[in-house]
Image (cartoon, rainbow, N blue to C red):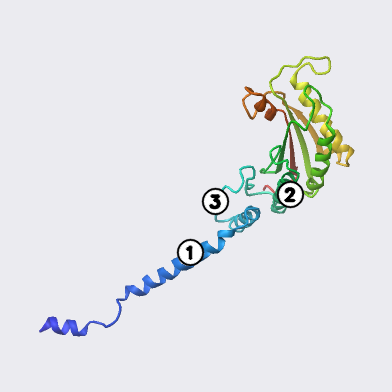
């Protein structure tokens, strides 16, 4: 008799836990709808959006999870002038688009660094073997790149020269150090002639001692013969603090 009364007093309808379960299903549905809507994400705009979100959650997140959009582009770390970082990101994208348009994406690589952008330009368009004079086609590329680089305000430009391990011993270039340095100096001289302020230009020659590929084949040695241009914005006093 007691069991019959308990059954009669039981509430009709779905159990109470179904309300929470229904909310969970709605949230999952919204989540997958958002994932579907983001399926056509423009890769070129993702790093900028991700950087903005990282800055917005600066007090909560120490790092922002990224996806491999392009192996040559990285998000800058937090800190410093965020406006300069966004402009550096935009300049890097423009360099990539320029290289692709001119069909130079194999010779010109760019990445975003903590302080700006780094542009790597490889042979065979740079210099003749054993020479430091800039080829005319390289001058045209430098002029076009400067139009993009000048969009990053208050910057310093450091040009690094690199060679392969082929020995050189001439009156002009006793070693690859002199050759790589002379090439870097000629690049900053050209930039100066194009209107870049001299107190923001510097040149470094590393010779054969910072290869990016083993000097075992002609193709790998060609990769090591390169110029790297670092465009770094000048941080104002107190920014890093």
Q: Quadrant of the N terminus?
A: bottom left
Q: Is 143 located above or below residue 52 in the figure?
A: above
Judge from the rendering whether residue 30 lies leftward or rightward of residue 104; answer left or right.
left
Percent position (x, y) of residue 121? 73, 36
Q: Nearer the viewer, residue 5 or 179?
A: 179
Q: Residues within 10 Å of mark 3 (few under 14, many from 20)?
A: few
Residue at (60, 49) in percent of width and height: 69
Q: Is residue 210 visible?
A: no
Q: Nearer the viewer, residue 3 or 104?
A: 104
Residue at (82, 47) in percent of width and height: 147
* Element under disc 3: loop
* Element under disc 1: helix
Judge from the rendering whether residue 138 lies leftward or rightward of residue 206; answer left or right.
right
Percent position (x, y) of residue 158? 76, 36
Q: Is residue 90 visible?
A: yes
> On residue 65, which mark appears?
3
Separation (CA) of disc 1 from disc 2: 33 Å
Judge from the rendering whether residue 189 lies leftward or rightward of residue 56; answer left or right.
right
The residue singled out by tag 2 in the image is 94
Percent position (x, y) of residue 124? 75, 31
Q: Earlier in the sequence, mark 3 or mark 2?
A: 3
Separation (CA) of disc 3 from disc 1: 19 Å
Q: Nearer the viewer, residue 52 or 136?
A: 136
Q: Residues within 10 Å of mark 1 (few under 14, many from 20)?
A: few
Residue at (80, 18) in percent of width and height: 173
Q: Earlier in the sequence, mark 3 or mark 1?
A: 1
Separation (CA) of disc 3 from disc 2: 24 Å
Q: Is 92 located above or below residue 169 in the figure?
A: below
* Element under disc 2: helix
The residue singled out by tag 1 in the image is 32
């Amino acid at each position: 008799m007691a069991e019959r009364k308990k059954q009669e007093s039981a509430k009709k309808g779905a159990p109470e836990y179904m309300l929470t379960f229904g909310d969970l299903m709605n949230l999952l549905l919204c989540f997958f709808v958002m994932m579907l809507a983001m399926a056509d994400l423009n890769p070129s705009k993702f790093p900028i959006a991700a950087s903005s979100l990282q800055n917005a959650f600066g007090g909560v997140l120490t790092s922002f999870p990224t996806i491999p959009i392009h192996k040559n582009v990285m998000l800058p770390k937090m800190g410093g002038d965020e406006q300069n970082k966004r402009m550096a990101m935009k300049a890097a994208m423009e360099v990539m688009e320029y290289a692709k348009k001119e069909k130079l994406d194999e010779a010109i690589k760019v990445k975003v660094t903590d302080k700006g952008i780094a542009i790597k330009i490889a042979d065979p368009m740079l210099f003749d073997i054993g020479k430091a004079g800039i080829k005319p086609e390289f001058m045209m590329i430098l002029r076009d790149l400067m139009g993009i680089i000048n969009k990053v305000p208050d910057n310093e430009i450091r040009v690094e020269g690199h060679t392969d391990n082929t020995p050189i011993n001439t009156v002009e270039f006793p070693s690859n150090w002199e050759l790589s340095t002379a090439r870097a100096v000629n690049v900053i001289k050209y930039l100066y002639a194009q209107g870049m302020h001299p107190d923001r230009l510097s040149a470094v020659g590393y010779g054969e001692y910072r290869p990016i590929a083993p000097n075992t084949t002609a193709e790998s040695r060609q990769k090591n013969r390169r110029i790297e241009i670092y465009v770094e914005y000048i941080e104002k006093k107190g920014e890093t603090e």
